[in-house]
Amino acid sequence: MRRPRWMRVGILVAAMAMAVAACGGGDDDTASGGSGAGSGQSGNFVIGVSNTLAGNGWREQMICSVKAQALASGKVSKVIAISKNGGPTEQIQDLQNLISQGANAIIVNPSDREKLNPVIQQATQKKIVVVAVDQAVSEPTAYVATNDQVAYGRLGAEWLAEKLGGKGNVLYMRGIDGVPADSDRDKGFQEVMAANPDIKIKEVFTGWDFTKGGDIAVQELGSGNYDGVWTSGIDYTVVNAFKTVGKDPVPVVGADNNQFIQQLLDGSPGAAVTNPAVIGGVGTAIALDVLQGKTVKRETLLTPEVWDAEQDKATLEANSFPDRDATFSSAVSVKPFTTYSNEQLFACKGPGE
Amino acid sequence: MTATPTPAPKAEVVTPLPRPSSRLERFVRRQGWVVGVALLLGVLVLWRSSQIPAFGAFEVRGIVAGTMTLALLAMAQTVIVISGGIDLSVGAMMVLTNCIAARLMLEQDLGPVVLVAVLVVVVAMLLSGLIGTVAVVSGVPDIVVTLAASFILAGLALIVLDGPGGGTHPRFQELLVGGFDEPLPATLWLAGIFLVVWVPFKRSRLGIATYAVGSDRAAAFLSGLNVGRTRIAAYVLGGFFSGLAGLVTTAFTGSGEPRASIGATATLTSVAAVVLGGVALLGGSGTLLGPMLAAFCLALIPALMLGLGWDPNYAEVARGVIIIVVVMIGGLLQIPRRAR
């Protein structure tokens, strides 16, 4: 039973080495593929994606759109996605890993406007194209592609003000106080309300939580008298709330959530304001243009579309996907940027996957 | 009648003279695990370097600077575990010091920033000493006191900074974690702290007392050691390392973030590094180098997964599996020793 100590340690080391070697055996093909990709010949680009809110449907769709656009472009050999929960500290680390991994372009949904700047600078010094999507970064060497959130607030509010004839009570269901997208939308919304002094608003925060938004709607719609509802994307549970309290629905302004589109098609009054999750695909298209030497302006601001339940039936039908999730972002393409098919987006597979 | 009892034949009991252990045996006994972890780290680094097109200063700096916080927290945890305690508040302490530092350093010159850095470390040492004192005086198990303390510290962090914010001096960042292509500052800091703080501590009376108290409190007491004071001293040293971890976080991101989950995750990873680094959770044995190296091993796993093209979320699973496997192998190796 008594083995010399050094032998025991030897066994430990050998066991570790074997375990590592066993894991290492599988990576030979990927490693060789990765090293060739760094050369950056056209058709052989590597795209990195960094996202710090995992398990969120909108963000997952954003990543799928990067993969789909990469596949449809035919110019990408691999998409490396790092999608895990974290803040700027983790994201700096993630971006460094993507740089090390030989990415030619990085699509990043930034967790902070300022803190990623040094690492983005580092990437651009290494001739890597960085595109911030959904939210902006202040680093001037990065490209930015965002949905115009001020216009999102304004367009929906304009539609509602017109629908109500400039007077009435509006339930104003915001997102999370202090988050940039919420402040921007509020700015657009308040611009319209300033021009319509006869509209009275009741402001509530949903935390962008469908369950919580539904609960608030049940309370408010049950007790108060509203002529219209503006939501910051927490829409279909609000429409459901009318059924719960047994009242006839009033016009609801929502986002392009799949379930809400269904409700509009089923005759519920309202309008959908698009907030495309496929902004990732837009960012990818921009990155590929830059990689191929085209001149692209630094900022791309997408103006939301408004789909009216009555007037835009055709668009709503074209963007209705009954087999997808309730919160699937129904604006599945942004012309002229995205070129993938719906099937490619739904498949969510990048090149070589 | 007197019967003369026949004496029972004497049993041949021979106690063999213990064989003097050789220098190599002693080294292997004391440092064997650390050498094992160092080899594992070597293999992981080689593997990582084979995964990426170019492995240079940028990559080394990324690994060293990115792991520094975790390495420091592992050190904090190690000292306290060796003294026979466990500190579930190291991560929260890091978050709190990060927030204090980021808030006070915002838009200051380098001089005041360095002053704040010193102050922050002192605050961390005092707070950690206070937590240790509560554990020692009250007699409540360390795990309970420090868990409760972690909530308090996380709450304080939110009072100091109600959301991500604050800042620091760019020069301070360079000094502590280096620019993107400079792996040297972070490496030197870690090596320096080890050589200047840990090595003298381990050889001092206090260091030896720490091992003794962790190994057997009653025996340490009977041999005239002040058990309570030694344990508190271990917490103070732990606070020193956690405070430094907070400073490094501040330098690495150039800001403060009061999110409590950061602290909780960091605490658990520090315990994992301690276990993987060959420090017995029962106290009284182990070295600081093992957990330091183990922290690097744990930090490399997500990058390796990425290189393999796996979902980085599996990295958490892989970390857990590696800890269990390594500790199991360690446990198996211990069986012959106990059977002796």
Image: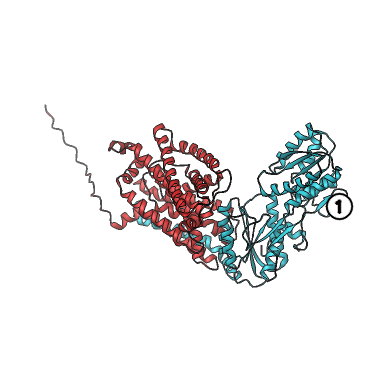
Q: Which residue is mark 1?
A: A312
Q: Quick one: B229 or B173, which is closer to the camera?
A: B173
Q: Quick one: A326 or B317, which is closer to the camera?
A: A326
Q: Is residue B141 above or below residue A144?
A: above
Drawn side of residue B41 relative to residue A107, left or right: left
Type of residue at label 1? Asp
Query: 10 Å neighbourhood of mark 1: few (<14), some, or many (≥20)?
Result: some
The quarter holding residue A160 reads: top right
Q: Residue furthest top?
A: B1
Drawn side of residue B171 relative to residue A263, left or right: left
The hue of chain B in the figure is: red
Rendering coords of residue A323 (x, y %): 78, 51
Q: Secondary structure at mark 1?
A: loop
Drawn side of residue A125 relative to residue B208, left or right: right
| Chain coloured cyan in the rendered structure | A
Rendering coords of residue A308 (x, y %): 84, 49
Q: Residue furthest right?
A: A311
Q: Quick one: B119 or B262, which is closer to the camera?
A: B119
Rendering coords of residue A296 (x, y %): 70, 66
The quarter holding residue A114 reads: bottom right
Residue at the image point whose x is 31% and y is 45% from the top: B208
Rendering coords of residue B206 (x, y %): 32, 44
Drawn side of residue A310 relative to residue A104, left or right: right
Q: Is residue A59 visible?
A: yes
